[in-house]
């Protein structure tokens, strides 16, 4: 049994062996009542749309039980298949920008959503820019400023960029995508059968956000992942130049709780976006 950080409070993670199968259980007696339900619903919603997600075996207010995954070395074949599956998942769409995942009965999740252990809005917007600035960057920026990890002059640059985003400077004609929402490399689990996705912050967003987060923290064979992705759904011209735009959100979230270095990185990304 191992204790791992979960931001809100320590979680107790245990491997439970039963007969010929074993499972992975995350427990947190102090978890928000919606925390594990949001995770389970997000995994189901993504899996319904072709994403290779970890199987949920059960969940309650204080725990979620998942299939146990065995790590393997990343391969080119697995990376290419992951890219194709990610594109298919994105193309399944969502009901709007910011829309929550949908359960097996076709009902939108009505509880609290989370990014990591931090609450995340499920307010739906018609435009991506208005959603992204108001619901995914600015709320976490304010927490980071209060925590002292983003300086006031840096925050002013981020806020100025968010003004441009909210005004639609970076909007396009693409519909809301069904995104993982927290797709850093730690949530991309490589197994002998291929990539398995874990710990989503699933919602309706822009597909470039998932790809930008893979790039932010590094993903093995990312170029191959992208090549596979584009065989299913080619990316819009200039997507690489917009990476900093889509990294504002994860950098703001990390600046809110993980130190000054992320505040500096958030400011750097905002300056890069201002040049677009």
Image (cartoon, rainbow, N blue to C red):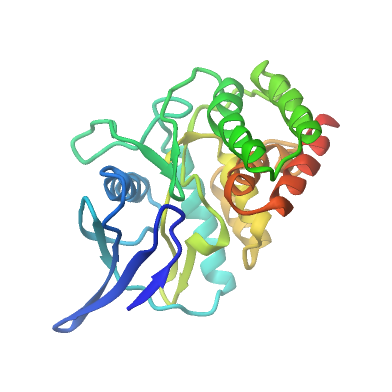
Residue at screen point 63% across, 37% down: 146
Q: Nearer the viewer, residue 97 or 255?
A: 255
Does residue 198 lie above or below 270 as drawn?
Answer: below
Does residue 192 lie above or below 228 as drawn?
Answer: below
Position in image of residue 241 (x %, y %):
78, 41
The answer to whether residue 30 is visible is yes
Query: Across the whole image, how many numbered discs are drawn on residues?
Result: 0
Left or right: where 30 falls relative to 59: right
Residue at screen point 56% across, 35% down: 206
The answer to whether residue 230 is visible is no
Position in image of residue 165 (x %, y %):
68, 23
Q: Nearer the viewer, residue 15 or 61?
A: 61
- Quadrant the C terminus occupies: top right
Left or right: where 158 falls relative to 10: right
Position in image of residue 102 (x %, y %):
29, 36
Residue at screen point 67% across, 18% down: 168
Q: Nearer the viewer, residue 236 or 25?
A: 25
- Quadrant the N terminus occupies: bottom left
Left or right: where 59 falls relative to 262: left
**Residue lying at the far left of the rendered structure:** 19
**Residue lying at the far right of the rendered structure:** 275
Position in image of residue 117 (x %, y %):
43, 49
Q: Quadrant of residue 119?
A: top left
């Amino acid at each position: 049994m191992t204790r791992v950080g979960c931001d809100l409070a320590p979680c107790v993670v245990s491997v439970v062996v039963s007969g010929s199968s074993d499972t992975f259980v995350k427990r947190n007696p102090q978890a928000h009542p919606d925390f594990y339900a949001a995770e389970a619903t997000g995994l189901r919603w993504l899996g319904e749309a072709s994403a290779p997600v970890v199987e949920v075996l059960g969940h309650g207010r204080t725990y979620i039980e998942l299939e146990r995954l065995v790590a393997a070395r990343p391969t080119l074949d697995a990376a290419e298949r992951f890219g194709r599956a990610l594109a298919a998942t994105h193309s399944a769409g969502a009901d709007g920008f910011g829309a929550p995942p949908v359960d097996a009965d076709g009902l939108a999740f009505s509880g609290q959503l989370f990014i990591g252990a931090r609450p995340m809005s499920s307010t739906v917007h018609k435009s991506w820019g208005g959603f992204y600035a108001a619901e995914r960057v600015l709320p976490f920026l304010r927490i980071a400023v209060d925590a002292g990890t983003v300086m006031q002059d840096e925050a002013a640059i981020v806020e100025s960029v968010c003004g441009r985003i909210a005004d639609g400077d970076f909007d396009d004609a693409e519909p809301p995508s069904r995104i993982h929402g927290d797709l850093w490399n730690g949530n991309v689990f490589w197994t002998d059968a291929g990539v398995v996705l874990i710990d989503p912050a699933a919602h309706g967003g822009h597909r470039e956000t998932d790809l930008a987060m893979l790039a932010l923290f590094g993903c093995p064979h990312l170029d191959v992942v992208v090549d596979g992705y584009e065989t299913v759904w080619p990316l819009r011209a200039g997507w690489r130049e917009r990476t900093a735009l889509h990294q504002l959100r994860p950098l703001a979230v990390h600046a809110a709780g993980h130190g000054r270095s992320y505040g500096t990185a958030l400011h750097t990304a905002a300056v890069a976006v201002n040049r677009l």
